[in-house]
Image (cartoon, grey):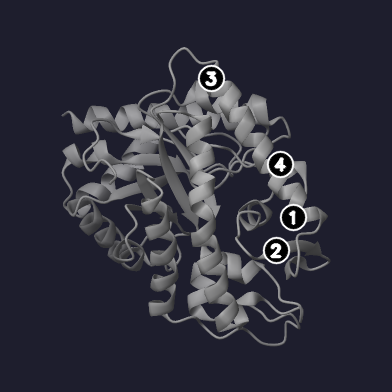
């Protein structure tokens, strides 16, 4: 189980990172995110096909193969060159993790990896017909089951690369509002796919989350955009926490987060926007988080359980800018700690 009441607020990022030098990215991340923060295995989509989030997670599927077609990743009968390229890139990255972690004087106590969640994966993988797999109930079921079957081996490889570190897994569901709202377009673009019922969404999440926990993962969170974020459903499916940007959260969503904190769940707060010409002041970010926190009746002491993240991935930045984001997040976590300690 995840630690319910950690002593300190902490910082991490969502996964996407700029550039194409994985070793340098990893050294930067692990250098910036020392204890009590959470270093992560970055995704460098700028390296091309297979290093994108869908290809990376798709390469873990068991008994399902993928390949790139003009419209995106497609389910195919046997692994093609793109599938093998994605698998090879991920294996290489894990080897680099082993080298970097092995060379450290003090190794991190935890490491985070990101996976695309089963619903977004189904919305981004295509069938032989050219339609999205999300259209087909059997395909959705197979993708969730295949992902659940593939995570244990992945977790084991990460654990071998970083011995002694607890493995934290972030499931990314950026398309979940469109999946549940029925607004994802068909291949033709003339209509939209039928909405997926909440019970099916919960079942798919539970299947993958249970597999992760059986593999010994110490913490699981589901990361979603703030618009119509299904916070209660995420937590009832068995996730240890929810990762969500703060900018447009409604009062009702804040109440859901408050209930999560009170029940011992983790909140990963996407508190730092990265789309402006410069980063906000640390004190302004802390205040932007503390004000609604206080308004929903949460005590300052509970801030020590927060993880703070950027509002988005960092692949759109330059490496030096991404590094500054991590530094800023650690300062925000320090500021939250000061509030928590009164």
Residue plotted at (51% across, 16% down)? 104
Q: Do the residues labelled 1 and 2 touch (CB within 8 Å)?
A: yes
Q: Do the residues labelled 4 and 1 touch (CB within 8 Å)?
A: no
Residue plotted at (39% across, 40% down)? 308
Tell me, for residue 89, which label it has, or none: 4
Q: In this view, does 49 lie to the left or right of 113?
A: right
Where is residue 226 drawn, in percent x and y? 44, 60
- One can see residue 229 in this view: no
Q: Is mark 2 on a helix, strand or loop?
A: strand
Q: For the residue carrying disc 2, how many other residues have a C-alpha within 10 Å: few (<14), some (14-19), or many (20+)?
A: many
Q: For the residue carrying disc 3, how many other residues have a C-alpha within 10 Å: few (<14), some (14-19), or many (20+)?
A: some
Q: What element carries label 3?
A: helix
Where is residue 159 drawn, in percent x and y? 47, 36
Between discs 4 and 2, the one toward the N terminus = 2
The residue to which callout 3 is attached is: 102
Of 181 and 39, nearer the camera is: 39
Between discs 4 and 1, the one toward the N terminus = 1
The residue to which callout 1 is attached is: 83
């Amino acid at each position: 189980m995840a630690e319910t009441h950690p002593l300190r607020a902490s910082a991490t990022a969502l996964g996407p990172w700029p550039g194409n030098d994985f070793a340098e990215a990893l050294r930067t991340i692990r250098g910036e995110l020392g204890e009590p923060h959470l270093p992560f295995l970055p995704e460098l989509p700028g390296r091309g096909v297979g290093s994108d989030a869908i290809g990376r997670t798709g390469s873990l599927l068991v008994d399902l193969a993928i390949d790139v077609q003009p419209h995106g990743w497609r389910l195919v009968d046997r692994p093609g060159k793109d599938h093998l390229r994605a698998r090879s890139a991920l294996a290489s990255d894990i080897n680099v993790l082993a080298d970097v972690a092995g060379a450290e004087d003090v190794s991190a106590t935890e490491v985070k990896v990101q996976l695309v969640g089963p619903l977004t994966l189904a919305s981004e993988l295509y069938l032989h017909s050219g339609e999205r797999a999300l259209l087909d109930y059997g395909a959705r079921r197979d993708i969730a089951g295949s992902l659940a079957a593939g995570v244990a081996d992945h977790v084991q490889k990460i654990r071998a690369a970083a011995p002694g570190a607890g493995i934290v897994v972030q499931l990314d569901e950026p398309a979940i509002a469109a999946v549940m709202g029925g607004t994802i377009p068909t291949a033709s673009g003339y209509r939209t796919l039928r909405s997926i019922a909440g019970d099916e969404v919960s079942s798919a999440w539970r299947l993958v989350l249970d597999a992760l926990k059986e593999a010994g993962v110490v913490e699981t969170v589901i990361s979603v955009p703030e618009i119509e974020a299904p916070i209660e459903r995420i937590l009832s499916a068995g996730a240890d926490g929810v990762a969500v940007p703060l900018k447009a959260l409604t009062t009702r969503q804040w109440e859901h987060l408050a209930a999560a904190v009170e029940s011992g769940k983790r909140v990963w707060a996407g508190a730092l926007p990265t789309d402006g010409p410069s980063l906000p002041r640390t004190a302004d970010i802390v205040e932007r988080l503390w004000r609604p926190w206080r308004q929903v009746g949460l005590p300052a002491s509970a801030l020590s359980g927060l993880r703070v993240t950027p509002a988005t991935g960092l692949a759109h930045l330059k490496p030096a800018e991404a590094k500054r984001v991590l530094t800023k997040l650690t300062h925000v976590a320090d500021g939250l700690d000061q509030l928590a300690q009164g």
